[in-house]
Amino acid sequence: MRIQSDTQQLTSLIENAEDIVIFVGPFANADASVSALALRAVFEPLKKRVQIYYLGNLSEELLSLPGGNEIKNSLPPTELVISFDISEKSIDRVRYFVEDALFKLVIRPVEGSLDPGAIKYSKKSFKADLLFVLGAKRLADFGDFYNQNSLDFMKIPIVNIDNRADNEQFGQINIVDEHAAGICEIIFTNLGALKLRPNREAAECLLFGLEMLKSGSGKVAFEKPLMISKDLQDETAVVKF
């Protein structure tokens, strides 16, 4: 396993984040989506706002897991933000209309006129303090969405989690374990180091993912013994195979 950064840094990023966005790689398998749901279940009781984006097909079983119906199946649209200084020019009215297939925004000051040269434009696609990217070899896997929002990806800390040896280590924090059977195993084995305990919903997702990995490949040699139980009496998840 290669973790480029210490757990203290990741713990601090999670503690300080209010909005966490989880992107599941477009070519990833269901294991990555289940892992995203497990992370969501761990983060939300910590008062984090969590969004998950995955462009692949979602099975009925996956949708039935806690939070499954909240996975967004399309990437967030990119907003165009128009801004200008109004410290010296107060705004009286703003209106818009469409004319000959052109969208027109009309801004009327209280007096005088506005300087078109003072208008600034920017783009905004999603609100996040911290990004998790699961099961993606590179950020370019997200295609046009990444190309159009590459500055946002550069500004926000990225936690890259994958189990492929050819992962390009694009995150500020990279948790890449090519020996792991899947991302669920990586999530489970690292929660303790981050002082995060799976609650009942997270345990249910992890159990589903680990059993899926075990049954899908016939014989999976997990890196360390994994123990979990859906019948949790407290916040500790105990899983047993």
Image (cartoon, rainbow, N blue to C red):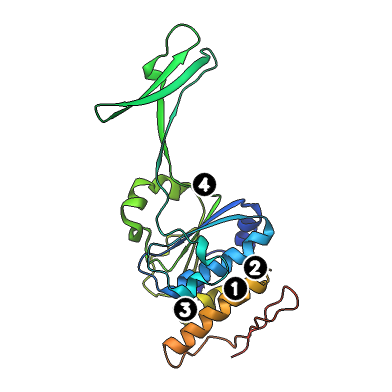
Q: Say if 206 sits above or below 26 in the image.
A: below
Marks 4/1: CA–CA distance: 26 Å
- Residue 24 occupies quadrant: bottom left
Q: Which residue is mark 2?
A: 194
Which circle, 3 or 1, is nearer the viewer? 3
Residue 214: x %, y % from top left: 48, 88
Mark found first going from the N terminus, 4 or 3: 4
Q: Which residue is mark 1?
A: 190
Of 106 and 209, which appears nearest the observer?
106
Residue in the picture at 40% in, 46% down:
77
Marks 3/1: CA–CA distance: 13 Å
Which circle, 2 or 4, is nearer the viewer? 4
Mark 3–mark 1 contact, CB under 8 Å?
no
Q: Say if 91 sits above or below 35 in the image.
A: above
Q: Which residue is mark 4?
A: 127
Mark 1–mark 2 contact, CB under 8 Å?
yes
Question: Three-letter amino acid code at disc 3?
Answer: Gly
Question: Three-letter amino acid code at disc 4?
Answer: Lys
Mark 4–mark 1 contact, CB under 8 Å?
no
Mark found first going from the N terminus, 2 or 4: 4
Q: Residues within 10 Å of mark 4 (few under 14, many from 20)?
A: some
- Per the rendering, the mark at residue 121 is none
Residue 175: x %, y % from top left: 51, 69
Mark found first going from the N terminus, 3 or 1: 3
Find numbered disc 4 in the image and state the secondary structure of the residue it sits on.
Answer: loop
